[in-house]
Amino acid sequence: MGMTITAKILAKAAGREHVCPGELIIARVSKVICHDVSLAAFRELERMRATRVFDPERIAVTYDHFIPSPSVEAAEQSRALREYLTAYKIRRVYEVGRGGICHVVFPEQGFVLPGEVVVGSDSHTCTYGALGAVALGVGSADAAAAMALGEIWLRVPETVRVELIGQPRAPVGGKDVILSLLGRIGTSGALYKAIEFTGEGVGALEMADRFTICNMAAEAGCKNAIIAPDEITAAFLNEIGAGEGEVFASDEEASYADSHTIDCGTLAPLVACPPSPANVVPAQKLRGVRIDQAVIGSCTNGRLADLRVAARILKGRKVSAGVRLLVIPGSQATYLAALREGLLEAMAEAGALICPPTCGPCFGGHMGLLAEGEAAISTTNRNFIGRMGSPRAEIYLASPATVAASAVAGEIRDPREVLDG
């Protein structure tokens, strides 16, 4: 019986030749990723009376959620985490000004490689599936156990196969691809399943698009999302000076729990309307919906390629009066690269506020919360009630192109209208 790429990676991590969906296994962990909100996981380590971690070099931590600290409470949380990192001799730490948002920083730093099993105390850890890794978001207790023991207990997931065909036509990108899937299968359409993206359409997607797709696959309830490595993956790893890892691919005879096909060539810019990432409609249908705030950034769309798309639309134009546009590069490296390319200058001249790398507004922490009655369009990944501030505010999710075009128009717009105009 054939195995999927996810099953193959888990089988190797479990020291097995073969595993089947539904089996309970203990898998060796390649890497563990954490951030400043992972303090709870380190407190669990202490509660377990763990005196050391399985390998300090295979644990990475960045400060991203409450950065810069918006309150004394957040500052105390960061201080407490620093004390744990010192006690457990964890040195791969990305501080303020040297790191950024975890799911942007760790791939940039070559910390995750194809074929690895990665555990993270964050629900969007599935982002790293874009590199051909099995990446699992877990709770604090499981993250602590993984750090202490270097292994994790889990059930092998079934896999949902999503075949991408055709080539997206700019300004359509990875965000539109994943919104298309979410609109089709909903927020529980892949509950505790792996989502495997495959097909000729994958070859037309750059790494930034792949990271976006795997990141937001979490909104379908998946255990992990994954794309088999190819020449584009290899070129990315070579560019950042990372290792090759181990490349796996699904067997032709592998079985799937479900299958879907998305024709990327026919996709239009899409928007997820409140209160769900699966409430998806074409951007054109929302023309005239007023916005107060626009956000470009996050672990979903805060990469250099995303900023290039936004800057192309904003350059020579102005953000509409009454709209606040926040641009948040995903990492310090991305910030510097965008600065050198003149992207930040173009966006600032258009009226954008350039913010430091932070998760801030995405989860309603700080740096851009919404007041009652306000509406925002954002490249972030969730638009549940109260996610970005007031429970009486509205959040629309879209691509960097759609968000930038909407910021210029003062209302939700299909970016093709602005570009063609």
Image: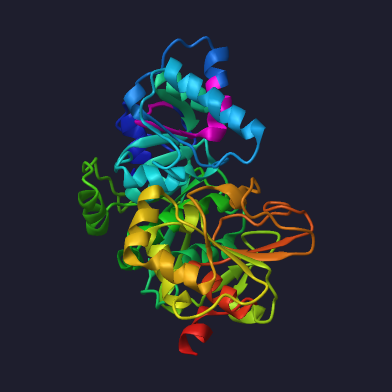
Q: Residue at x 45, y 74 (%)?
A: 172
Q: Position of residue 296 (x, y in %)?
A: 52, 62
- Up the image or down, 360 lies above or below 292; here it is above
Q: Position of residue 27 (x, y in %)?
A: 39, 27
Q: Toward the viewer: 50 or 266?
A: 50
Q: Residue at x 54, y 41 (%)?
A: 67
The stretch in magenta equals 26-42
Q: Is residue 189 magenta?
A: no
Q: Toward the viewer: 96 or 304?
A: 96
- Up the image or down, 362 lies above or below 32; here it is below
Q: Toward the viewer: 217 or 56?
A: 56
Colouring mode (rainbow / by chain / secondary structure / one colour): rainbow
Q: Is residue 33 magenta?
A: yes
Q: Toward the viewer: 83 or 234?
A: 83
Question: Would residue 182 be found to the left or right of residue 239 on screen?
Answer: right
Q: Residue at x 45, y 55 (%)?
A: 329
Q: Position of residue 394 (x, y in %)?
A: 72, 62
- Up the image or down, 128 lies above or below 297; here it is above
Inspect this view and state whether residue 149 appears: yes
